[in-house]
Image (cartoon, rainbow, N blue to C red):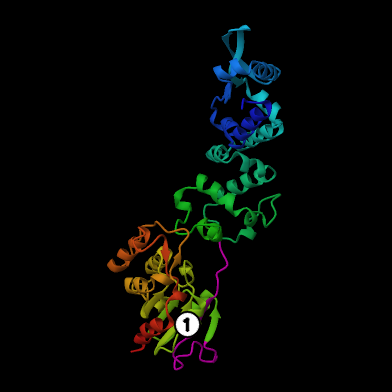
Amino acid sequence: MWTTEKEIKQQLDKLWQKGGFLSAVVSGESLFPLKLKLNKPTSKQITEQFEQVRKWVAELAKLSFIQIEWKSISHRIQGEQQIPESIWIKDLDTLLTVLRQKSVYQQFISLVEMTKGEPQLLVWLEKYPFKAVELAEQWQSLLKVVEWRKQNPSPNIYLRQVDIPTIHTKFIEQHKAVLAELFNLVLDESQIDSQFSGVSQFAQRYGFCDKLKPVRLRNLDPDYPILSEISYSDISLDPSSFAQLQPKVSKVIIVENEINYLTLPNIKDCWAIWGAGYGVNQLINAKWLNKCQLYYWGDIDTHGFAILNQLRTAFPKVTSLLMDKEVLVDNLALCSREEKQSNAVLSNLTEQEQVLYQALQQNYYGEKLRLEQEFVPFGVAIRRLECLGT
């Protein structure tokens, strides 16, 4: 039906929720006078429902917060009449009054003023105005952290060690997501380690120390214990201790899935490492690995190949295991969906691996296909693995 006061306010609220009125504080874009959508009566309705139309016009004319552009029409009985042709909001103050958002608007202005000392961050405020308002109480502290990081280009300390007056020790850890977005805007590329991404890799990406996960390993050959004084076949060591090992084995298998790691068969002259994944930095100081034949067994998906590619930056001779076209095609019925594929250019893959990686990216075998390594039939895996012991 024809536009009512309630519908006008709903229009304004929807426009407000898009954030454009706040973003305009940063961009300087002029949005007023603002034309609104107006559903008005047709010529036939004016003729056949004149009394209802007249009431609608009267109700609209009562609304002091809108400006009406009138149009003259000639009615065969009533003569010349004025009908609304379009409606407008005159200015921002009117809008804020109608929506009762003056305090929010003033708060955002304060945030913008506060941020002018870091002009590169204004684009973030423009893009995420309501997110900024939600963080209003923390914004000054966030700016202090950004400034501190700019003044300390190579922090090399733990996040809890950052000493900024009035900011408690957990603040950075609690706000990693937004700080990452802000750091990306203000820091030089040379201060960001692009091989790391996401909240879980915040510390490594921005030059902070991160607690290193222990390296878990087991010997697959009883004749080659990991530590001579310890009989356990499955142990965990801190990366530093792992790097100091001097094993006599000539083969090492890196496996992503824990159950597969635990069920690996005995293989002559071989150890296994569980779950290096993107955490290859845990291994790079272990120079003895370069003397071994390294194998990597991960998922057949884009991230599995991305991990393999990263491993080869540190260990160029790594050989992929059970990550080939044959294994994938034979087990298509066991595949699942990889929600977010990697689109990275991987330069450390072999020709066959590259072909399969690109086929996965292009959905050649199915939409966002992935074959998780735990779904590879156990018998198939055992036959391939046992060949390593010969």
Name the residue type under label 1. Leu
User: What residue occupies the far bottom of the structure in this picture?
Assistant: 223
Query: Which residue is drawn at the image coordinates 61% and 27% (left, top)?
Result: 1
Query: Which residue is drawn at the image coordinates 53% and 27% (left, top)?
Result: 29
Task: Bin the neighbour count of mark 1 within 10 Å (Cα to Cα): few under 14, some 14-19, many 20 and up.
Answer: some
Foreground of the two, 38 or 377: 38
Query: Which residue is drawn at the image coordinates 40% and 60% (left, top)?
Result: 367
Kind of element beneath mark 1: loop
Query: Which residue is drawn at the image coordinates 37% and 59% (left, top)?
Result: 361
Q: Is residue 167 magenta?
A: no
- The count of marks equals 1
Q: Is residue 26 above or below residue 340?
A: above
Foreground of the two, 295 or 225: 295
Task: Give the percent coordinates (x, y) of residue 92.
Answer: 63, 25
Task: Give the percent coordinates (x, y) of residue 74.
Answer: 57, 8
Instruction: Give, as a single range, the part of the protein colored magenta.
Output: 209-233
Quarter the C terminus occupies? bottom left
Q: Is residue 18 above or below residue 326?
A: above
Q: Give the main secondary structure, helix, strand or loop, of the magenta stretch.
A: loop
User: What residue occupies the far left of the structure in this picture?
Assistant: 351
Identify residue for label 1: 245
Q: Is residue 230 magenta?
A: yes
The image quadrant that residue 20 belongs to is top right
Residue 39 seen: yes
